[in-house]
Amino acid sequence: MYQDIIKLEKFYQSELGKAVQDRIYSKLKKYIYLHDGEKLGCFGFGEPYLSLLPKKKVSIFNFFSQRIGIKKNIINERLSNVLLDEEQLPIEDLFLNHIICIHCLEHSENLKKTLRELWRVLAPEGKIYIILPNKKSSWSFSSKSPFSSGFGFSKNQIVRILEDNFFEVQSADRLVYFPSWNSKLLLNNRFFLEKIGSYFWRFFNGFYLCVATKRIYANSEPKKFSFIKKRSSAEQV
């Protein structure tokens, strides 16, 4: 089980972890567009993915949960490591332009409360990128998988949960069809396995990458205007 930062780091240093990182990031970079001056927050354990982001003048906040612990901060002018409680974020409203969640929401004890907090700190039209395990996949059960220690989800569950918590889902992509085995033979043929897997067992993908936008609700009760003109004194006679 991957419950702490040391085991997660070890996984991403393995050949299997590098293959997972490459597959997730190749899809993530198609959606995430960073602009100078923006703020990005990563919740869970996203360090392997943060290191691949474009070198722009973006402030990055790497938020670690108390569950996995925190890594000693490396001198980096655009990266800050912070330990926090995911259900009570010490972050001001509308602070972040982008949020990445990985190895995070599947461990939440109160998913609704966590998502409402993420919604609160996300700026209007801000985007959230969530990687979650598929409950039908072997990645949700294998001891070699860092996604096996939390809850699994179906695609419909993810979309419904996000919409119920004021996010507008833009996409929910299926990722990773190669098994969670650290086998050199399988990893060397993972691109072939991805192709046939997406065709023959498309519902058994390892993870989902969900991209959603913060939904802002307008006042549902418009102001009432009176179209009755006051009668003049001449009309009243």
Image (cartoon, helix red, strand yellow):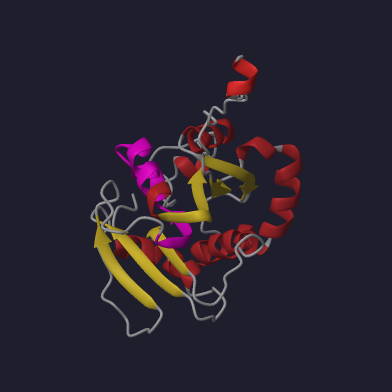
Viewer-proximal residue among 120 and 49: 120
**Vertical comparison of 217 with 177: above or below:** above
Can residue 145 be seen from the camera position used here?
yes
Can residue 181 be seen from the camera position used here?
no
Q: Which residues are magenta?
A: 95-118
Judge left or right: residue 212 versus residue 83. Answer: right
Judge left or right: residue 60 versus residue 219. Answer: left
Q: Residue at x 62, y 25 (%)?
A: 227
Pinpoint residue 130: horizontal percent, then vertical percent.
Answer: 50, 50
Judge left or right: residue 202 versus residue 166. Answer: right
Does residue 6 show up magenta in the picture? no
Viewer-proximal residue among 3 and 184: 3
**Vertical comparison of 27 with 47: above or below:** above
**Vertical comparison of 26 with 142: above or below:** below
Pinpoint residue 206: horizontal percent, then vertical percent.
Answer: 56, 46
Quarter of the rendering occupied by the C terminus = top right
Residue 197: which quarter of the image?
top right
Viewer-proximal residue among 14 and 160: 160
Residue 122: which quarter of the image?
bottom left
Q: Residue at x 45, y 66 (%)?
A: 40
Taking the view exactly as shown, the residue that stands out farthest to the top is 237
Pinpoint residue 133: horizontal percent, then vertical percent.
Answer: 49, 44
